[in-house]
Every structure is written in C-alpha cells, then in structure tokens.
Amino acid sequence: MTNEPPSFLSDQYKQAVTACKTGWTVMRRRGPSQVQFWFIALVIGIAAGFAALFFRKGIDALQAALYGTDDVQFLHTFAQSLPWYWILMLPVLGGLIVGVILHRFTPDGRVRGVADVIEGAAMRDGRVERRAGAASMVASLITLSSGGSSGREGPVVHMAGVISTLVCRKINADGITGRDLLGCAVAAAVSASFNAPIAGALFALEVVLRHFAVHAFAPIVIASVAGTVINRLEFGDVTEFVLTTPGALQFYVELPAFLMLGLVCGVVAAALMRSVFWAEDLGTHLQRGLRLPRWLRPALAGAMLGALAIWYPHIIGVGYETTYRALSGDLILHEALVFAVLKTVAVAITFGGRMGGGIFSPSLMIGALTGLVFGVIATGVLPDVSGLPTLYAFAGMGAVAAAVLGAPISTTLIVFELTGDWQIGLAVMVSVSMSTALASRLVDRSFFLTQLERRNIHLAAGPQAYLLAMFRAGAVMRPMGDARGGEPDVCREMIAEGLFVEASATLEAAMPLFERADVAFLPVVTRSKTQPPELVGTLFHIDALKAYNRALAATAAEEHS
C-alpha cells in the first residue's frame, strides 16, 4: 500500500499552523522586551523633541532681545535700521563668549555637530561626548543669536545624541541598542526642528546610522512622530515656508534644464564645502602663526561677520527670511547672486572661526538663491517653454542641501515637508540626483564624512575602512607568557629592527606593517619618554584578521537585520 502525498490544502493548513505557533512563541519571548524598547524610544523622542523646541525658542528669544525686534522671522529687514556699531559688536561679543565656553569645556576648542554623531554611531556604540556636547549647544545658541551665519540642525542633532547617550549609560545598552536609540533621538530632534516626520526618520537612517535595517525602523518612526507632535503643539500644522506661487512643471521639455541646474548646484555645494574647509585650515594656520589664544578665534571671526553684516544683514543667523524671498521670487538677479556669494563667505567665516552651528540651513538658503539665479536666466532665454523662476529656486534649495548632506532621499523629503508642495517632485528629484552624484565625487561623499576624513576617520569608504581603527593592539595581542605567543628573544630582535607596535596603536596602523614586513606576528610594546620599549605581548596577523572578520560579520548582520 503506497502513501498518498498530502493535498495542497492540507499542506497549506499545516504551514499556517506552524507559522502561527512560531509567531506566538516569538511574541511571548521577545514581545515584552520589544514593547519596552519602543517605550524607551518614545521617551527619548519626547525628550529630544522638547530639547529641539527649547533650543529654537531660546534662539528666537535671545535674538529678539539682542536685536530689539518682536519678529525674528524678519530680522534682516529690521537690522537695516539698527546702528552700525551695534551690528558690528554683537557678533564680536558673541564670539568672545563662545570662545571662552569652548576653551573651558572642550579639549580642542571645537564645536560638536552631526559629524561627531555619525562617528559615535559607527565607532562608539552610539555614544557621543556629553560635556563637550552640552558646551557646543550653548555655544551654538549664542552664535546663532548674536549674528553667526549657520544653522540650528547641527547642535540640535548632537544635543539629541547627548540625551540618548545618557539613556544608554543608564540602561547599559549594547552597541546595536545604543545606535538604535541614537537614531531615535536624532529623528525626533530633526522632526521637531522642521516639522518633518518622514524626513526626520529617514535622516537618522540615511545620514547617522547609514543603513536601513528593518529592526531600527519602527522605534525611529515612533520617536520621529513624537518629535513632530511636540513641534505641532507649539507651532501648529504649518510648513516652514509658505509658498505664494504654485509650483508646477509647464512642460516636460523643462526637465533637461533641471538636469543642468543639478550640475550647477553640485558645483555650488562643493564650493561651499571646500570654502568651509579652506577657512578652517586658514584659521588654524593664522592662529598658530600669530600665537593667538584659541578662545580669541571666534571673536575675530565675529568681527569679520559684523563688518560684513553692516552692509548685508542677510547673512545673520539661519537666513530663512532671505530663503523665503528667493522661493517667492522677491529678489532680482543680481541680489540673488550677491547674497549667495556673501552667504557662502559668511558660512566659511563662521565655521573657520569655530563659532558653532550647522550647515543644513545655510545650504538651503544658498541653494534657493542659486536656483533662482538659474531660473531667471533660463526663463529669460526660453520664456515660451519655461515655468516660473521660483520652481528652479525650489529645486535648487533641495539640490544644494542634498549634495552637502550627502543624503538625497531624506533631503528631498525634508524640502517637500518644509514647503508642503508635492507637485513638482520630478524637478526636485532630477536636480537632487545630479547634484549629489557630482558633489560626492568632489568631496568624500558629504560635508560630514569629509569632516571626519580630515580627522583621519575613514567612514566614507564603509566599514571595511574604519573597523580596524576600533581595535587596539593591546586588546588583541597574546600577552607575554602565553604558550601560543612569540619567542621573547625573537621579539627583542624585531624591536631592535624597528618592527613593533605600541599597545595603544590600532589595527589600522598594524596591518600595513604586517604587509610590508611579511611576518606572522609583531611585538607589542609600551614605552614612555624616559624608558626604552617594554615588551608586553605579541600581535599575530591571524588574530588581527579574525577580529576584523568578526567585526565585519557583526556589522553586516546588524545592517541586514
């Protein structure tokens, strides 16, 4: 007698029962802990949202007090009526206070921002510096309130990172949990700052965590929504920019013009980033050459900004008034061109002087001005097949910002959410794609990753480039006395030949030495200025490769979980 195969319906029924049992088991074992984690994400989202809200309100209140205006949204217009000496002195005084704060509370006199949060996510288990972060927040608050030319998203993102770091220390979170909570805090802060819940969540995934793992998506969305709710409770469900002219493509033949605009914006974004890096190098060179105390550097930058603001107050602060005028077409060609150049100079001075703030809002302003200039020219050359110049300003705003951040997805969405206009998606997407593709070749993918590359932190090339820097030779070595270690006499001969690594060195420094010397192991030493190298162990090439391979596997598992 032969056994008949089970019917199709019977087989499907058994599979469904098995799936339900498995699902119920997973819910019983992991459900409570997952719900608890989502609750922590919600709490972090609320805390980061309120922190971003208070930071924004603090800037508005201090700016209104210093400049004597009731409506800081029109600060540039009001500042034209103030005495010139007041416009000049405010950034100087603000820079002096910033310099003292950073000198006292940071080890290097540098403001922390988004790049440091990205580094914390990749190399510090989702932790960022707390003391320096708090000082950077205060410094950026003073900078943006007293005439500095930068944005508020950088300090807000790092401030959110400080909040998540405090929670991680409290619950003793591991690396994956710490990174997820950091993403939650960043998403909530960005959402609360710009009333952009979709872009806030994607910004955390695309820019900070730099992956789109499924396990991180739900808690980050929860936190992002919490931050948005806090923003809307205070400001209502309104967009940052209210456009006065409708945006719509007149003809599809306009799309090649937006391709060209994207290339122009890519060059402009690269010029903005390069000018900031050049200003930082120049400032450091002058500081060393003139032997200036580091606390005086922001004050000197403030003097330069104040002198520029006497004639062009449009450079003061975030610059949303000028951005709005560009998006509304309320600027003529030469005004838009001059303002774009001067804002780039002012941003470079602010960052070169280490005054604090972020790069995103200035890139929005410069992008809108660039797009308006391009649009005025394009519609003037081909008026019969062109839409409004403001359409190009809209696309330019997204294109420059996306190229600077190296985040085409989240930047495209945040521009939509800032304006509430979803009808011109083709124009924005075409411009953003071209600008990002071009600018990423002219720098190390983005402004933040280039900042890290300049500090010899190689995140732009991916985990294979930076994971070796996470392991110290002293942690991977086989200590002296280990039966599997190297012979002491052989090690001493190698030390005499200069073939050794210090215990505090990373595998990033040791691996090239293995390749050059073609040896199986390297002596590991500790040394001081007065004592010769002391042999403490041996670092085997195979052990270094195993540690590296385990780190790569763990990173891949997290990114695909």
Image (cartoon, rainbow, N blue to C red):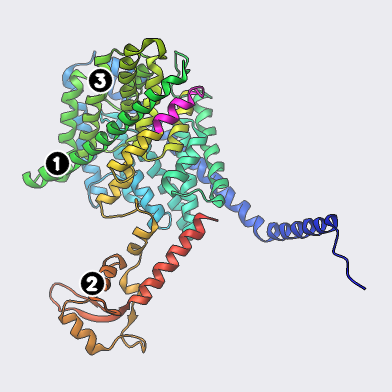
Res 337 → quadrant: top left
Q: Main secondary structure of the magenta part?
A: helix
Q: Is 427 a magenta residue?
A: yes
Q: Quadrant of the C terminus?
A: bottom right
Percent across and percent down for residue 419 are 46, 23
Q: Which residue is mark 2?
A: 516
Density class for disc 1 (Cα within 10 Å; few <14, some 14-19, many ≥20) is some
Farthest-out residue, front: 1
Q: Quadrant of the N terminus?
A: bottom right
Residue segment shown in magenta: 420-432
Q: Which residue is mark 3?
A: 337
CA separation, marks 3 and 2? 53 Å
Mark 1 and mark 2 lie on one chain; the one further toward the N terminus is 1
Q: Is residue 269 left or right of residue 187?
A: left
Mark 3 and mark 1 lie on one chain; the one further toward the N terminus is 1
Density class for disc 3 (Cα within 10 Å; few <14, some 14-19, many ≥20) is some
Mark 3 and mark 2 lie on one chain; the one further toward the N terminus is 3
Q: Is residue 292 above or below residue 146?
A: below
Q: Which residue is mark 1?
A: 282
Percent across and percent down for residue 37 are 57, 52
CA separation, marks 3 and 1? 25 Å
For the point 30% across and 55% down, the residue is: 457
